[in-house]
Image: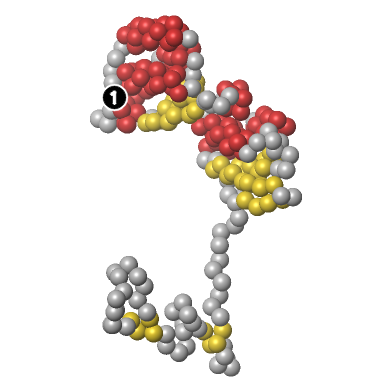
């Protein structure tokens, strides 16, 4: 172990204290290894993770990797071309599926017009994995002010369990999905109800109105009351426009 000098002198508490280096150690205090002949060998270089970006012809090439859960592998395989074409043809990106790691890998190319396209493509793939249809998720590539918000039923009301939780999910969906469709059309959003998780796709203001309506249903409000409140809020939003 290196010996620390006890005579601090005029050093302030934030300054480094001189350290005496013993023989057999390098400057950084790491003991030098010796080979069979007794000669000192430099310590091994650290190993780093693979690069996520590099330069090609003076242009930065970046990557995005989107993990795919097991239950979405088959839908992704069936609709792969519908995801592949807009990303490669319109955004000028490279995309492939890594079956070993179960991740969709997206890479920019020298022909990519904008580096923001890489994040748009990752959001597009992530929206499909969350359960949105391709025709709805493709709006993320065309518009800049669209977002996805996710939350769980228990984030709104933690005491729901068993049959009470099942009835709550039924209130949000409605008979044959009627309540969900009504909220989507009124707020101009898209909603995915995946068990106890809710995903909302839309603009910031529309997501807020949709979220308030869904939270009212979770807390026990009847659909009729939610519809009337939704009608007045949407009328007020249309007047502002």
On the rendered structure, is 241 left or right of 151? Answer: right
Residue beneath the point at 35% across and 70% down: 15
Q: Is residue 39 above or below residue 96?
A: below
Residue placed furthest toward the front: 10
At horizontal 73% and vertical 32% (from top left) the residue drawn is 89
Is residue 147 rendered to the left or right of residue 115?
Answer: left
Q: Position of residue 77 (x, y in %)?
A: 64, 36
Label 1 secondary element: helix
**Direction from residue 208 to residue 76 in the image, left or right:** right
Q: Which quarter of the image is occupied by the N terminus?
A: bottom left
Counting from the top left corner in percent of width and height, residue 55 is at 68, 51
Place of residue 132 in the rendered image (x, y in percent of width and height, measured from the top left)? 54, 26
Return the residue found at the far left: 159
Is residue 211 in sight in this rendering?
yes
Residue at 73% of width from left, 43% of height from top?
110
Q: Is residue 192 visible?
A: no
**46, above or below 74, in the image:** below
What residue would you read off at disc 1? 164
* Point 38% across, 81% down: residue: 19
- In depth, the one of 178 and 227 nearer the eye is 227
């Amino acid at each position: 172990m290196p010996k620390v000098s006890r005579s601090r002198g005029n050093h302030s508490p934030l300054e480094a204290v001189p350290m005496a280096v013993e023989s057999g150690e390098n400057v950084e205090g790491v003991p030098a290894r010796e080979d069979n002949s007794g000669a000192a060998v430099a310590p091994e270089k650290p190993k780093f993770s693979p690069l996520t970006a590099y330069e090609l012809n003076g242009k930065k090439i970046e990557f995005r990797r989107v993990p795919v859960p097991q239950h979405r592998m088959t839908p992704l395989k069936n609709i792969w071309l519908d995801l592949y074409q807009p990303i490669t043809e319109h955004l000028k990106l490279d995309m492939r599926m890594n079956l070993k790691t179960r991740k969709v890998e997206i890479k920019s190319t020298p022909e990519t017009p904008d580096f923001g396209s890489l994040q748009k493509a990752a959001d597009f793939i992530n929206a499909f994995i969350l359960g949105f249809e391709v025709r709805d998720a493709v709006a993320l590539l065309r518009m800049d002010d669209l977002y996805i918000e996710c939350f769980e039923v228990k984030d709104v009301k933690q005491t729901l369990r068993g049959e009470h939780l099942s009835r709550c999910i039924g209130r949000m969906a409605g008979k044959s999905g009627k309540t969900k469709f009504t909220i989507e059309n009124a707020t101009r959003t898209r909603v995915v109800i995946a068990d106890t998780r809710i995903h909302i796709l839309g603009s910031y203001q529309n997501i807020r109105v949709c979220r308030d309506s869904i939270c009212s249903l979770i807390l026990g409000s009847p659909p009729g009351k939610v519809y009337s409140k939704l009608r007045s809020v949407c009328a007020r939003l249309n007047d502002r426009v």
